[in-house]
Amino acid sequence: MLHKVDMNQIYCIIIIFLGYLTNYFLLSLAHYLLEDYQVQSKSYYCGSWVEGQSQGVEVRDAVNGEVVCNVSSDGLDFEKMLQYGRDVGGEALRQLTIHERANALKNLGKYLLSKKEHLYAVSAKTGATTADSWVDIEGGIATMFSYSGIARREFANETFIVEGAPEVLSAKGSFVARHILTSKPGVSVHINAFNFPCWGMLEKIAPSLIAGVPVIVKPATVSAYMTQAMVEEIIASGLLPEGAIQLICGGVGDLLNHLNEQDVVTFTGSASTGKKLRCHANIVENSIPFNMEADSLNCSILGETVAVEDPEFTLFIKEVSKEMTVKAGQKCTAIRRIIVPADKVSAVKEALISRLDKVTMGDPSVEGVRMGPLVGRSQRQDIRATVAKLAEHCELVYGGNEATINLVGENVEQDAFYPPTLLYCDSPLTTDAPHSIEAFGPVSTIMPYNSIEEAVAIARLGKGSLVGSIVTYDDVEAAKIVMNAAAYHGRMLILNRDCAKESTGHGSPLPTLVHGGPGRAGGGEELGGSRAIKHYMQRTAIQGSPTTLMAITKEYVKGAKTVSYDRHPFRKFFDELQIGETLITHRRMVTEADIVNFGCLSGDHFYAHFDELAARDSLFGTRVAHGYFIISAAAGMFVDPAPGPVLANYGLENLRFIEPVPIGDTIQVKITAKKKIKKDQRPEEKVPTGVVLWDVEVTNQDQKVVALYDILTLVERKTKSGK
């Protein structure tokens, strides 16, 4: 029998095949390029690459144990480094608008993508598979692109941010307030973890640089050479102002002693280290913002309603095994606690063991290897000790310290490898160990529950985590768990058959979403779209007259002095328009014919417009015009019909119908230039443009406001981008 060919399936097969070829090529290239790779790690300090003055810490290849480099920051003057960042990098960044900073990041992202083969090659030394490196390298670059887009979409092309609507503080409106955010004249110090040496850096520097604050990056010593490789490319690109980024490979010495109230510190790593840094005397004394994202005992809950034969059961097993093996389980978001209905414990154990049995370990450059080593020998020692502690309270189900590891590849040393390991805790509500002891590797513990209330109680015992996930097809069950467990998590994923194909998964933080969590997870927030950019800026309430605030914010505030000219504002180029420039139109009477004609045209025959008796008994007391007729008529009153600098209506925002307009009322429109946003000219665009936001106020014959809204117009600029 002949079947119709599904071309989509064929395309998918081709794409998957090409993906495998690409992965194999990159891994082979990494193996070839780095056979003899050994360097002295350097710091980028005050505009120069500088080697440490002592041998420092020896760092080895995670796969074969050979020495990669020695890491030391001895000899650096950290006070001078901070001042260089403030005076040189900060000054240069603050001269740029937010859009210019965002464009610099976009161009930098493109440049780094052109260098990714070299970066993949270096990443192989950390034990990362190609999939692991993709998340770290290209995932980090994608975060930069995302922040560049967020900044250009959500913020004006200024050096500052105006936040929220004006606040009227007086009866007659002559005293008002606004909130603005300005760049801190300091430096942001980023102390990062070893597991994502590229992504961990890029996801922090992107919002900081857009905010106009230069960065000092301090990567973890064991993978500092990977961060250094990317910073070398960033510096070589010449796309960031000098001093915008500096790098410390090695210890931070007395750096924290020289921070001041305009600086910011972010930390990613263990909760114990984070707590010590947060309590540093100078950080406490100067109230220096300290954002902490710590490793946590994240959980995944299998819904009570899920049957073994359901798609959700399979999704649950896949998600848990993936989070145990990606990056060899070295993820702050990895699933550490597997919370399942008591009657499905055996099925979950069996399914997980079956899946983990298929995981091939060894040299990531060898085709078919799905899990590489931990980042170093010391991490393996830590995990062995931690698993031993957990085994005192839990049953070892699979893997563990005594498990035999079959490794694929030549010249592979066992020093940094640890097998996927499952434990089982029979009484999670009475045993604290699995809720307080974390093995930062491919280790997870299964825990049974007998009711949704018990599942939530077990989840809460983690005392705060970065992420929790729920796998269920029952939305009532999902809602119950979320509403009772959300306060203990920074993010929650609900996974089922409907979203599985496009889901980014339990362990994937996204630039647009908050990354952080309460309690043990550090109590901070990273990422989160525009929130992350604002984290590096100072929010200030400014108070004064509407006219003064308009001059400061470059946005029209109701009540501010306006200007009018004989020339219609729609006849002016973007560059010529002034904030506060106003047009007051002629008047127009609303007739019954207007209502009837608009109703016939739109198909809107709502009773308040057409039924005299029903309208009389309504809150209006009489027939009234359609609200959308009012704004349509208003457009006809303020639009200049001839071709000109105004190219298009870009949108309408914040529409409010304030008062009804009955037959016989007369309306008039006041339109005021409220805000101007210069756009970058794209190659395909014939002319440079900007967006003008107009404040529109429609009043009746008694000077009562009947409608308020903003419109956006696309307006041609006289000058090209950058002029």
Image (spheres, rainbow, N blue to C red):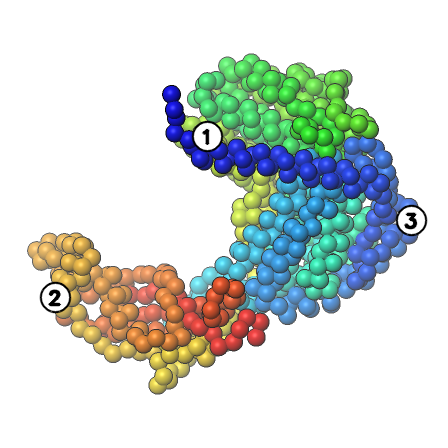
Residue 550, visible in the rendered structure: no
Q: Please, is residue 448 above or below residue 707 in the view?
A: above
SS category of the residue bearing label 3: loop
The kind of residue on which mark 3 rests is: Ser
The kind of residue on which mark 1 rests is: Asn
The kind of residue on which mark 2 rests is: Glu
Q: Position of residue 632 (x, y in %)?
A: 26, 65
Residue at the location (74% across, 30% down)?
363
Residue, disc 3: 54
Q: Nearer the viewer, mark 1 or mark 2?
A: 1
Give the Cα separation between the discs numbered 2 and 3.
89 Å
Q: Position of residue 33 (x, y in %)?
A: 78, 42
Q: Please, is residue 580 above or below residue 650 in the view?
A: below
Tell me whether circle 1 and circle 2 mark residues in contact (CB < 8 Å).
no
Rendered image quadrant of residue 417: top right
Quarter of the image where the N terminus is located: top left
Rendered image quadrant of residue 269: top right
Whether residue 67 sits left or right of residue 434 in the image: it is right
Quarter of the image where the C terminus is located: bottom right
Residue at the location (48% across, 77% down)?
718
Give the Cα separation between the discs numbered 1 and 2.
54 Å
Whether residue 223 sits left or right of residue 607 in the image: it is right
Tell me whether circle 2 and circle 3 mark residues in contact (CB < 8 Å).
no
